[in-house]
Amino acid sequence: MANQTKAEMAAALRDAGIPRKAYSIPQFCARHALSEGFYRKMRERGLGPRETRILDRVIITEEAETDWRREREAATAVVE
């Protein structure tokens, strides 16, 4: 596995049925049909998901993604 590309490693995990637990910003944006520019606007306004920084990488965990969706849904809930 040491000589595989990131894409090959991701495909191997997917084929083995191992779910992904964290996403890059482009992956997160693709999952939620957002442009990266819109993501940056949300982040600047404090409306983006929690980010985890590891050296020069930024990832969004599955838990942060779930919390973010719940927060956005709650913020737009109609009170009757």
Image (cartoon, grey):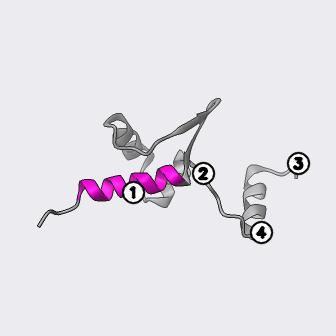
Measure the C-alpha gap from mark 2 to mark 4. 17 Å
Query: Could you say which is closer to the camera, residue 15 or residue 50?
Result: 50
Of the residues under marks 3 and 1, which one precedes in the sequence?
3
Q: Please rate how many residues cluster around mark 3, counting C-alpha atoms within 10 Å: few if below 14, some from 14 to 19, many from 20.
A: few
Please name the amino acid that badge 1 sits on.
Arg
Q: Please rate how many residues cluster around mark 1, counting C-alpha atoms within 10 Å: few if below 14, some from 14 to 19, many from 20.
A: some
Of the residues under marks 3 and 4, which one precedes in the sequence?
3
Please name the amino acid that badge 4 sits on.
Ala
Residue that label 1 marks: 69
Residue that label 4 marks: 16
Q: Indicate left or right for 25 with 18 as reference.
A: left
Could you tell me what secondary structure mostly forms the magenta stretch? helix
Residue that label 3 marks: 3
Query: Could you say which is closer to the camera, residue 72 or residue 2?
Result: 72
Q: Which residue lies at the image location 34% right of the left edge and 52% below the top edge?
A: 71
Measure the C-alpha gap from mark 2 to mark 3. 22 Å
Q: Is residue 6 magenta?
A: no
In the current view of this chain or complex, which residue is farthest to the top? 55
Q: Is residue 64 magenta?
A: yes
Q: In the image, is residue 9 above or below residue 47?
A: below
Q: Which quarter of the figure has residue 62?
A: bottom right
Task: Provide residue 23's location: percent of width, then percent of height.
Answer: 58, 51
Of the residues under marks 2 and 1, which one precedes in the sequence?
2
Looking at the rendered structure, the secondary structure element under dot 4 is loop
Looking at the rendered structure, the secondary structure element under dot 1 is helix
Q: Quadrant of the C terminus?
A: bottom left
Residue that label 2 marks: 22
Q: Which residue lies at the image location 46% right of the left edge and 42% below the top edge?
A: 50
What are the residue bounds of the magenta stretch?
63-76
Q: Indicate left or right for 4 with 55 as reference.
A: right
Of the residues under marks 2 and 3, which one precedes in the sequence?
3
Measure the C-alpha gap from mark 3 to mark 1. 36 Å
